[in-house]
Image (cartoon, rainbow, N blue to C red):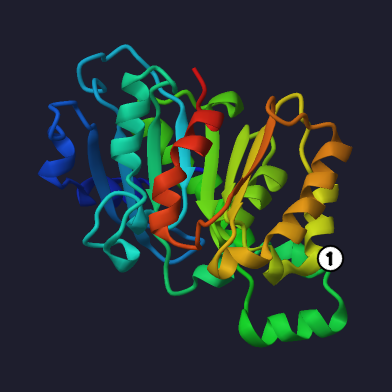
Amino acid sequence: MRLCPWCVLAALAATVCWGAWMAGQDREGAPQGTVERHADFPSKLVAPRHVDVWLPPGYAKDAGRRYPVLYMHDGQNLFDPKTAYGGVTWGIGETMARLIAARKVTPAIVVGIWNTAKRYEEYYPRKAADALAPADREKLDQKIHPLLADDYLSFIVTELKPFIDRTYRTRPDRKHTRIMGSSMGGLISLYALEEYPDVFGGAGCVSTHWPIVTDAGVDFLGRRLPDPKTHRIYFDFGTRTLDEGYEPFQQRMDAWMAHAGYQSGRNWLTRKFPGDEHSEKSWRQRVNVPLEFLLKK
């Protein structure tokens, strides 16, 4: 499926470069890359939302180079403290620029997809809901309804990704396409990998909010893991605030990972961060870890 011409024109017309602080240099004089915003990106499947695209240093100068792409959820929290929750971003641009300069990751494009008022509806793995016990499903339907994750992922795969691949110099194949998010964004990232294993080659699941899918949902997702020969998956969790209750669920998923043939340190990594809480501040402090694992040189 391709975007209709007016959609492409509207998205292009809405594109603006913003944030001179991001387009220039940091205090040490190191280039930080640039961010382009596609405001109110149109869709036939979900509500319009902003899409921010971070381009690595040197993108404009080397016209022959093509780049892997990392898609990230909760895009308003990635780059600009004015839009980030609590005024704290993930520091994606700064961290990516630093890792690229240190040759720890391959230069890549990062696409930040903003969330909407229907964040929970779009990020809850829809098919996992069918695995819940009747009482748990009833509670879910009372809190989160309707479940829109399938539409949200279809938007990314059939509308947004084709636009990104046409507009920027990407490497569009599975091997060079990753997806990542935190909390509910961790759940939808794993679900994306399982629903579209031929599109995404890796997923970063940061502080994954397992309790909302219960053990039954973890088992459902665990049984559907993609081929470890062609995919890599990152998980992590802290030990404070919401993250305090995640470890038993993560251990359950880790057992599924091992059962599926994933090898820790090779195509799978689970990290525990003692003292870290469920917040952008904590994710900012450790985001280099999933970035390095997903975008290794």
Disc 1 element: helix
Q: Residue at x 55, y 31 (%)?
A: 294
Considering every residue shown, the one lying at the far front of the view is: 275
Q: Say whether residue 87 is left or right of residue 78.
A: left
**Residue 7: where, in percent of width, then height?**
35, 51
- Quarter-wise, where is residue 126 in the image? bottom right
Relative depth, front residue between 51 and 78: 78
Q: Quadrant of residue 201?
A: top right
Q: Quadrant of the N terminus?
A: top right
Q: Along the line of sight, which residue is nearer the eye, 64 or 44?
A: 64
Residue 280 appears anywhere in the view? yes
The percent position of residue 106, horizontal first and vertical second, equals 43, 20
Indicate left or right for 188 with 107 as reference: right
Give the x, y percent position of residue 261: 84, 31
How many labels were placed on the picture?
Answer: 1
- Vertical position of residue 108 compared to residue 86: above or below: above
> Is 57 left or right of 262, judged from the image as shown?
left
Identify the residue shown where x is 57% and y is 53%: 274
Q: Amino acid at mark 1?
A: Ala
Percent position of residue 134, x then y: 86, 81
Residue pointed to by mark 1: 216
Q: Residues within 10 Å of mark 1 (few under 14, many from 20)?
A: some
**Residue shown at 16% from the left, 34% from the top:** 26
